[in-house]
Amino acid sequence: MIHIEVIVMDIEGLQAFVAVAREKSISKAAQALHTSQPALSLRIRRMEEGLGFPLLARNWNGVRLTPQGYYFLPYAIRLIQDLEDASSVLTNPWGEEVKPQFEEVTGHGDRLLIGMDTWLAPKYTAPILRVLHHSYPGVNVRFVTRPTETILDLIEYRSIHLGIHYHELSRPALRTAPLAEDDTLLLAAPDVERSIDPQLDALPDLTLPFLLFDNPVLLSHRYVTTAMFQRFGISRIRVVDDLNVAAALVAEGLAYTMLPASTYAPSFRSLEPAIVSRSLHGLVPPLPIRAAYVHADDDPFAEIIRCVIEHISVV
């Protein structure tokens, strides 16, 4: 497991790595960052030690990214950009002219914050809104969509009040309640789906690649992914990181995939009948969906949280 605190605390190391990736040279990167070459190399080496893998391959011909470095680069760029964006919002350089927007974005105290795994948002957003509108019409609610692990972290840090997530290892600090079990669907173009044996024994013979979602999905749902690969003998893989891209590839008959039923809408359903689905119930372990929260006697939203959980547990 990568220790995120190492990365966050070493922003200079991230900037150094990104600069080397851009300049293709440690010396040029050092010049761009107005630092010495030894200092820049030390920053990157310390970050590599913290991560536990090499980012750069160094030789007499120069420097290049390792396979790990190529994979890590977009995450490094995104992290730097996210931190810069957050800093820009919090410093509010636009002044009074955007004060209402600034206060709405940063406000927290009187707002019910509900976090949902990104893939569960299509299933639960509308039912939650209906419950709140009917029983608590005056409540100020904001939704946060992130991967399951992030949602659970945010609850533990008391940054959100209620989380809707896929099951993972229990966390003693959190209270949880079962909501439902999510089936897994095989998604393919009609011609591809018809060529698959009804018992799904023919999957290993498919010439099409299987669409595997990159992080955070790969990490969060690894136990389901592992079960699918073992059960069906999947060997050909194509990596994607966006549901809309995946839906287009499937609809064009260029690939197939398996996803939780809650994820089927809206990206895939909008492309019917170019995409058909088949339930894998009994063949792939179901995905437990749970609600999580921190119980506190002084929580002003405790009653609302109980009400929401009670109503959406039958969705």
Image: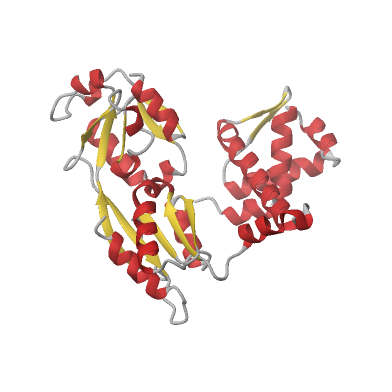
Residue 158's spot in the image, x, y percent? 51, 68
- Residue drawn at x 81%, y 30% is 28
- Residue drawn at x 80%, y 44% is 39
- Residue drawn at x 22%, y 23% is 193
Q: Say if 295 sits above or below 112 in the image.
A: below
Q: Is residue 209 visible?
A: no
Q: Given the current orientation, which residue lies at the most extreme bottom position? A: 297
Residue 315's spot in the image, x, y percent? 26, 55
Q: Is residue 111 visible?
A: yes
85 and 215: which one is in front? 85
135 and 172: which one is in front? 135
Residue 246's spot in the image, x, y percent? 40, 29
38 and 290: which one is in front? 290
Query: Residue 247: which quarter of the image?
Result: top left
Q: Say if 172 sits above or below 58 in the image.
A: below
Query: Residue 255: which quarter of the image?
Result: top left
Q: Say if 72 sits above or below 193 in the image.
A: below
